[in-house]
C-alpha cells in the first residue's frame, strides 16, 4: 500500500495559549481569539479529511477488485476449516472497511477502513494458500503512530555490538511501539513522528470547550475503539466490532 501522506502533525496542541494574555485582554477578545483558533483547527481537519477520504475509498475499491478477480477465485472445500475461516474473515474485513467508509466521522475511521481492507487481502491470501496446501505468510504489525504508513520496520539487530551498553532514552522511545522506518528515525532524532490526528473537544484552563487535534491514540479508550489498537491493526475482532456498530459508540463531534 502506498503511503497516504497526511501532513506532519507535531503532537498535542498546548492549551495554555488559549488563555487570556493578562488583565488588558478582555473576555470578549479572549472569546474572539478562541473562535479564530477553533476555526483554524476545523479548517486543518477538513483539509486532512478531504485529502484522506478519496484515497481511502480508492484503496478499498482496489481491494474489492482484487478479491473479485476471477483468476484468484476459489471455494474452500469441506474439511478445509482453516481456509474457510480465513475466507469468511476476509469477507467480514472487506465489508467492515466499506461500512467505515460510509459512516466515518473522523480521520481514524478512514484509516481503519484502509487497515481492514488490507486485512481482507491478507486473510484472502492466507485462505488461498491453505487451499493450495501452502503455509500462509505471517502478517506484520503496522506503524502504531500512523497505521497508514504500513508495516512497522524490523527492529535493529545486534545493537551497538557492546555488551551492557546503556540504552538511551531516544532508543527506548523508538522501541516502545511498532513504528515504520521514518517514524522510528524521527524518534531516534528526538523529533515527533508523523502521527495520525483526530478531532477532540477539550477544555482550556478557564473550563471553556475548545476543539483540538490530537494524536489518535490520545483519545480516551472508552470513546474510541481505535486508540489502543492502531486503528484495528492489533485487534483481531475489529471487523466484527465494526459490523456490530461499536465504532459509533463515542460522542458526536
Image: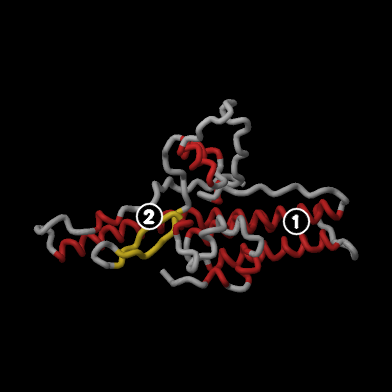
Position of 159 relative to 120 (above/below): above
Residue on which the image places disc 2 = 44
Where is residue 67? Give x, y as percent. Answer: 73, 57
Q: Quadrant of the C terminus?
A: bottom left
Task: Evaluate whether residue 137 shows in this view.
Answer: yes
Q: Residue at x 38, y 52 (%)?
A: 12
Q: Is residue 245 left or right of residue 94?
A: left
Q: Residues within 10 Å of mark 2 (few under 14, many from 20)?
A: some
- The residue under the point 15% across, 65% down is 27
What residue is rendered at 31% in x and 53% in y?
Answer: 14
Where residue 189 sits: x, y (%)?
A: 44, 35
* Nearest the eye: 197 or 189: 189
Q: Nearer the viewer, residue 214 or 56?
A: 214
State which quadrant residue 40 falls in: bottom left
Sooner in the amino-acid sequence: mark 2 or mark 1: 2
The numbered mark at residue 45 is: none
Q: Depth check: 173 or 37 in front?
A: 173
Residue 162 appears left or right of 199: right
Callout 2 secondary element: helix
Q: Which residue is mark 1?
A: 124
Question: Please, is residue 227 above or below residue 240 in the view?
Answer: above
The Cα atoms of the two marked residues, 2 and 1, are separated by 37 Å
Residue 76 horizontal/vertical position (percent): 85, 61
At label 1, counting other C-alpha atoms closer than 10 Å, the crowd grade (few under 14, some 14-19, many 20 or more) is many
Amino acid at each position: 500500500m502506498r503511503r497516504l501522506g497526511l501532513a506532519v502533525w507535531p503532537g498535542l496542541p498546548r492549551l495554555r495559549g488559549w488563555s487570556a494574555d493578562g488583565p488588558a485582554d478582555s473576555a470578549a477578545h479572549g472569546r474572539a481569539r478562541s473562535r479564530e483558533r477553533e476555526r483554524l483547527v476545523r479548517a486543518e481537519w477538513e483539509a486532512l479529511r478531504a485529502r484522506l477520504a478519496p484515497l481511502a475509498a480508492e484503496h478499498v475499491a482496489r481491494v474489492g477488485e482484487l478479491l473479485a478477480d476471477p483468476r484468484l477465485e476459489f471455494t474452500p472445500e469441506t474439511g478445509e476449516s482453516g481456509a474457510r475461516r480465513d475466507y469468511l474473515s476476509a469477507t467480514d474485513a472487506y465489508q467492515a472497511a466499506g461500512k467505515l467508509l460510509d459512516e466515518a466521522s473522523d480521520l481514524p475511521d478512514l484509516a481503519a477502513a484502509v487497515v481492514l481492507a488490507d486485512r481482507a487481502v491478507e486473510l484472502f491470501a492466507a485462505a488461498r494458500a491453505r487451499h493450495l496446501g501452502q503455509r500462509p505468510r505471517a502478517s506484520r504489525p503496522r506503524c502504531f503512530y500512523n497505521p497508514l504508513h504500513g508495516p512497522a520496520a524490523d527492529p535493529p539487530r545486534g545493537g551497538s555490538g557492546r555488551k551492557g551498553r546503556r540504552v538511551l532514552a531516544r532508543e527506548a522511545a523508538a522501541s516502545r511501539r511498532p513504528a515504520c522506518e521514518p517514524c522510528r528515525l524521527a524518534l531516534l532524532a528526538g523529533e515527533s513522528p508523523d502521527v495520525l490526528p483526530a478531532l477532540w473537544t477539550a477544555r482550556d484552563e478557564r473550563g471553556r470547550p475548545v476543539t483540538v487535534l490530537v494524536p489518535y491514540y490520545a483519545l480516551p479508550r472508552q470513546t474510541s475503539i481505535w486508540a489502543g489498537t492502531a486503528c484495528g491493526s492489533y485487534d483481531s475482532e475489529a471487523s466484527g466490532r465494526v459490523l456490530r456498530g461499536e465504532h459509533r459508540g463515542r460522542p458526536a463531534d
